[in-house]
Amino acid sequence: METRIYDFQVRVLITRDDNQYVAHALEMDLVAYGDTEKEAIKEVARLMRNQVSFAIQKGEDHLFDFRAPQEFFDEWEKAQKAFLKGIAAAKCGRIKMRAVSKIRAVNLGFDTEDIEAMRRCSHSDKAFELAPACA
């Protein structure tokens, strides 16, 4: 297994809203939608990169430091704990591993290379795409 160190991590709460998935980046209070979880995560990651790049371009780090209300962090914690309980129960043979909740808690991480790419792109007209790192 490859080990990567992420210098900047954001908690993402994934829920369903009617027929779409919602990905909410909590430390930045950005929300994105997709027909699948993967699409929603990809879109919120793109929004995060754009916001960080814009803050770098303007030289104002406060532009990407908006926290979602505490209730969303509480939901993320509950979803994370439920998932960990599911792993433990599956290991002990009590239940089959399955989605424990309709809410998922994931992390998106950016390493130094990702941040440097954002810095470079903020000084050019090039657009960039994210290959999100889910931890």
Image: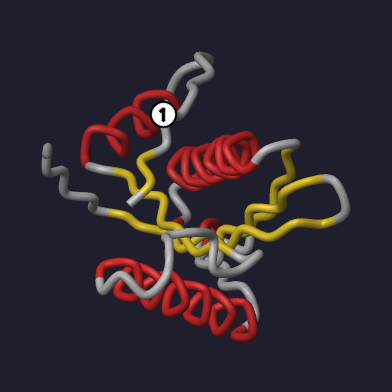
Residue nearest the viewer, comparing 47 with 51: 47
Image position, residue 45 (x, y; %):
52, 41
Q: Is residue 65 above or below residue 58?
A: below
* Residue 3 in which image quadrant: top left
Image position, residue 91 (x, y; %):
26, 67
Which residue is drawn at the image coordinates 62% and 37% (left, top)?
43
Image position, residue 51 (x, y; %):
56, 45
Image position, residue 21 (x, y; %):
72, 48
Residue nearest the viewer, comparing 99 with 111: 99
Residue kind at label 1, given as amino acid type = Ala
- 109 to the left or right of 17: left
Q: Is residue 77 above or below residue 14?
A: below
Q: Is residue 135 above or below residue 36?
A: below
**From the image, which quarter does the N terminus lie in?**
top left
Which residue is drawn at the image coordinates 39% and 33% (left, top)?
118
Dot 1, how many residues are within 10 Å of its Cα: few (below 14), some (14-19), or many (20+)? Answer: few
Which residue is drawn at the image coordinates 16% and 49% (left, top)?
5
Dot 1: element: loop
- 28 to the left or right of 8: right
Q: Which residue is mark 1?
A: 131
Which residue is drawn at the image coordinates 26% and 74% (left, top)?
92
- 11 to the left or right of 31: left
Residue nearest the viewer, comparing 99 with 132: 99
Give the residue furthest to the top: 126
* Residue 9 in which image quadrant: bottom left
* Residue 68 in which image quadrant: bottom right
Total number of numbered labels? 1
Coloring scheme used: secondary structure
